[in-house]
Image (spheres, rainbow, N blue to C red):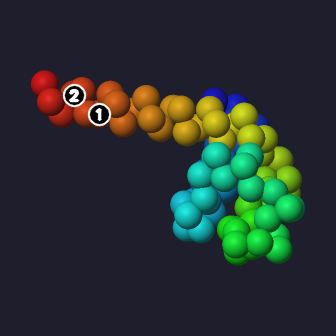
């Protein structure tokens, strides 16, 4: 793993922690937008906006998060498989 890959992995982890602490999902990042800032989803829209800001600051792309989530899901499936055998 190169230094750039390690830096990206750390940044992705930071964004994932941010999302977890604020109850956000990848779907929220796509589904909730500026139009929700004045509605019932105002607080969540502010959290989504802050998340996108953090991603921009750290240079994390949505695809990086998506790949990270997929990797975690695959790891959890593997853990469950090995735990049952």
Q: Residue furthest left?
A: 85
Res 79 label:
1
At which x and y percent is residue 52? 80, 56
Above or below for 6 versus 10 = above
Decide: marks 2, 1 in contact (CB < 8 A)?
A: yes
Q: Residue at x 70, y 69 (%)?
A: 41
In the image, taking residue 82 as reference, residue 52 lies left or right, namely: right
Q: Secondary structure at mark 2?
A: helix
Whether residue 11 is visible to the viewer of this picture, yes or no, is no
At which x and y percent is residue 54? 78, 60
In depth, the one of 30 and 59 nearer the eye is 30
In the image, taking residue 83 as reference, residue 2 lies left or right, namely: right
Above or below for 11 versus 17 = above
Q: Quarter holding the C terminus?
A: top left
Q: Quarter holding the N terminus?
A: top right
Corner quadrant of residue 51:
bottom right
Q: Residue at x 18, y 33 (%)?
A: 83
Q: Secondary structure at mark 1?
A: helix
Per the image, the residue denoted by label 2 is 82
Whether residue 48 is visible to the viewer of this picture, yes or no, is yes
At which x and y percent is residue 57? 85, 57
Q: CA distance from mark 2 to mark 1?
A: 5 Å
């Amino acid at each position: 793993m190169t230094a750039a890959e390690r830096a990206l992995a750390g940044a992705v982890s930071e964004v994932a922690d941010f999302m977890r602490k604020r109850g956000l999902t990848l779907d929220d990042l796509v589904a909730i937008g500026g139009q929700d800032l004045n509605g019932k989803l105002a607080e969540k829209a502010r959290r989504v906006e802050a998340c996108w800001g953090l991603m921009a600051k750290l240079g994390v792309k949505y695809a990086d998060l998506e790949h990270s989530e997929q990797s975690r899901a695959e790891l959890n499936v593997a853990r469950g498989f090995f735990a049952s055998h």
